[in-house]
Amino acid sequence: MGSALRKWARAIVVVGIGSGSAAVAGQAAANGQTIFVDPEVVVTVETSKGVHAHISPPLVPVTFSGLWYIEPGSYTIRREARVDGRRYALIPWARRQPDEKIILEEKKDKAGCRSVVQHFAAIDMETQELQNRTWVFTRSDCDIGDRWDQRFWLARGYTGDDFLVREEPAALVAERKTEADRAARLAEALAQEENRERQREQEALLQLEAPAKRQIGATVCRKRGLIGFAGYTEQVSPDTGRIRVRIVRHFDASNGRFLRATPPEENVWDDPDNWYRCEF
């Protein structure tokens, strides 16, 4: 029985996430260097699906670590890892259960120095594959950072190759952003001008219709919410220019169809600009 369990455990350990995992497997203890991305370039990583992972083997029924994940989207990379001549874009791992935007862990080096490290997902900038160990970084002087650390397994349905790494000159990115901002401002200005033009047309139409709406017997309508009102101009105030409308019909404001029920007539004084000429 014990022999079977040992074989089962060994079978779990060899489960990988892609060709990139093999390269890391032999470097679990290899140190490297964590550096800021060169300010002269912009490195972005895009993933359409993101990643869900566990740090327990997939066949173990209880996962004490919770779900580790990287959300789908585009990431501007601030730090990269350099190990044995290879470069890795670093994205902070997040965790649910408990909910944490970044994953921090206290570690101790051989000399007893304690410090907190942060776990990053590492994407090989050449192969564009996610490595199957976390990269840890610390701001302290303890000898516990800048190395491969925690082995993890991807959740079902996720792969380590859903990443697109792009490295561009910062000047080119800034130029593209400036052009995009300019286009956005131009589109906003055009939209505002179109809105002003519609308002001018509406005001001109109201001015043209105003005398007609003040004629006694003119048929006028108004929409208020879901209900429309139709009636006749009965009287005009010489002092205010307001009109008295005798409302005789109601209609559905969404389609203009008159309601079957005939409402009791009512008279309202109102600004003629609130009404429009209509036929019924």
Image (cartoon, grey):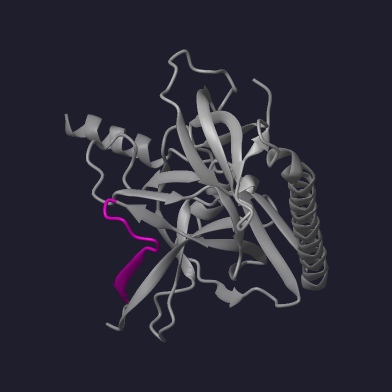
Magenta span of residues:
97-108
Residue 126, image x and y in percent? Answer: 70, 55
* Residue found at the very far left of the displayed protein: 1
Residue at the image position 51 percent from the left and 30 percent from the top: 247
- The reply to whether the magenta stretch includes residue 103 is yes
Question: In which image quadrant can residue 103 be found?
Answer: bottom left
Q: Quadrant of the N terminus?
A: top left
- The reply to whether the magenta stretch includes residue 252 is no
Does residue 92 appear left or right of residue 165 in this picture?
left
Does residue 11 appear left or right of residue 28 in this picture?
left
* Residue found at the very far bottom of the displayed protein: 141
Residue 68, image x and y in percent? Answer: 38, 50
- Establish if 32 lies above or below 61: below
* Residue found at the very far top of the displayed protein: 260
Q: How many marks?
A: 0
Residue 129, image x and y in percent? Answer: 61, 48
- Establish if 208 lies above or below 200: above
Residue 205, image x and y in percent? Answer: 78, 44
- Residue 162 visible, this angle: no
- Establish if 58 lies above or below 67: above
Question: In which image quadrant can residue 187 be found?
Answer: bottom right
Does residue 165 appear left or right of residue 16 in this picture?
right
Instruction: Judge by depth and name the residue closer to the eye, 152 or 198.
Output: 198
Residue at the image position 43 percent from the left and 38 percent from the top: 15
Q: Quadrant of the C terminus?
A: top right
- Establish if 59 lies above or below 31: above
Instruction: Judge by depth and name the residue closer to the eye, 175 or 120.
Output: 175
Instruction: Judge by depth and name the residue closer to the eye, 20 or 192.
Output: 192
- Residue 196 visible, this angle: yes
